[in-house]
Image (cartoon, rainbow, N blue to C red):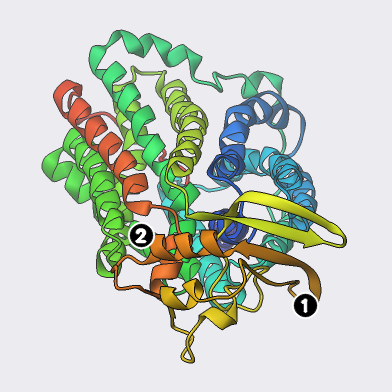
Amino acid sequence: MDTKPAMIRTRLSAMMFIEFFLWASWYVPLGGYANSTLKLTGAQIGWLYATTAIAAMVSPLFVGFVADRLFATERVLGVLHVIGAVSLFLAAGQAEFSGLMTFLVINTLCFMPTLALANSLAFRNIDDREKFSRIAVWGTIGWIISGWTVGFLIGEKTSAFFYLAGAGGLAMAVYSFTALPHTPPKGREAAQGDVLGLGALVLFKDPAFLVFAVCAFLISIPLSFYFTWGNAFLVETDRPRPTALMTLCQFSEIFVMIVMPWFISRIGLKAVLAVGMAAWAVRYLCFATLSFPLIIVGLLVHGFCYCFVFVASFIYADKKAPQGMSASAQSLVAFLIWGIGMFVGTQLAGYTATQYPPQTIVVLERAGNEEQPIVDAPLPDWSTKEEKARLPKALRSAEEDRVAISIAEALPAESVSFNVLSKTGEVVGSLSYSKKDLIQALKKADASGDGVVTSAEWRSAQAHRWPPIWLWPAGLSALACALFWIGGRETKPEKAQGEGAPAS
């Protein structure tokens, strides 16, 4: 029995594991870290996540016109991952938006091409293309293990996850140079192709395909909301181990990938796509309730959201395209979803969050001999020592779980001052809250109206207004579903299935 093909598949499986492990290590917890620790604005966080969309629009040009023609694939993978790893290490030290954005742009411009290159290398080194799914599933497993590592060991409060991702990038670089099978360039002629799918634009003459393309673009916007704000939402609402909790999505994804062929054969591809779009609306309606059991339901429907929409979209495009145009059609769908759609989605996600911000307060910050007013300062944290600003202990009861507004009103001074601590516990400045502003903040946080603010009410005031934020992508998902159900058409059953979509 020839064991060489099996050994190659094992090596390719390890490649997929490392590839998606390192991506998830920074991509999932970034939103929670940027929101809760760096205190970036919604628009800024939207731009951080837009880096992958920008790179997704550029990477096909690199892969199609440079990598495939001139260099061995495993060497290109190695070089790109070295640069990407260095940029992630440097990103870990950035506390301001501009620096973090710069290094994430560099990283994603290097990383996003590796997704297509890894798939290309795998297909060129396996004897049976039908076995690719057994290799690709290790990418999902890598995503899960990464979530557990960050969620249970590292957390989302510090930039340590960037170091984990950077280490993964270096491991992938070494693995590419030493363990991946040699995959020489295809050459100038063989690599020529319609990398952006422009040849498939002719399919827009078919009204049904045009409706499908519009709906694929529209549904990628709710996907952007999930990646941009999912982790931040769980962090702000005090859910346990947010990054690890989100791996429920990948378990759901594996299950749905297994049963998806059965659904396609029973209800048809059009209905599968429509159900997937409806599942996005259900997910966000669950999130909007703020009920933890329903949030779990919202995470568990991820398999239907992702597989029934994005994997099915590539199958749909393959079946709708005439003979010889399948690759162009899939390139076009990828460009619409992962490029333009995700870019627009991240911008809308960032903008939406800025419309429903956490409660703020006016403070005077003193550093040295200078005092600077901050109009829209975040509310101070309740009691966490690591945070820069803490709610003064004098206001809290002995149990430290509630504040009577009457205590604040009885304070003799017109302002409340306390030290600002660094993460090491050193005094680095001071903050002054106007008693009037602090009382107003306490009254706004008093959701029960009983004159007492609990720690839970205070944390709620520190969080974004999540229900309306989630209702926007829920409504857009419902719109896409209705539009596709009315204007979409079933595909011909005899057409061969396409190669699928990237793992989530």
Q: Is residue 275 left or right of residue 322?
A: left
Q: What residue does disc 2 label? A: 254
Seen as rendered, the residue at the extreme front is 412
Q: Residues within 10 Å of mark 2 (few under 14, many from 20)?
A: some
Q: Position of residue 469 (x, y in %)?
A: 37, 46
Q: Residue 452: percent from the left, percent from the top? A: 37, 76
In this rendering, the label closer to the viewer, 1 or 2: 1
Identity of the amino acid at label 2?
A: Ile
Residue 191 or 218: which is nearer the viewer? 218
Can residue 336 be seen here? The reply is yes
Please name the residue that numbered disc 1 is placed on: 424
Residue at 23 percent of width and 18 percent of height: 208
Tag 2, which secondary structure? helix
Q: Residues within 10 Å of mark 1 (few under 14, many from 20)?
A: few
Element marked by disc 1: loop
Q: Nearer the viewer, residue 442 or 142?
A: 442
Label 1 close to label 2 by CB (< 8 Å):
no
Q: Would residue 306 be found to the left or right of residue 27 on screen?
A: left
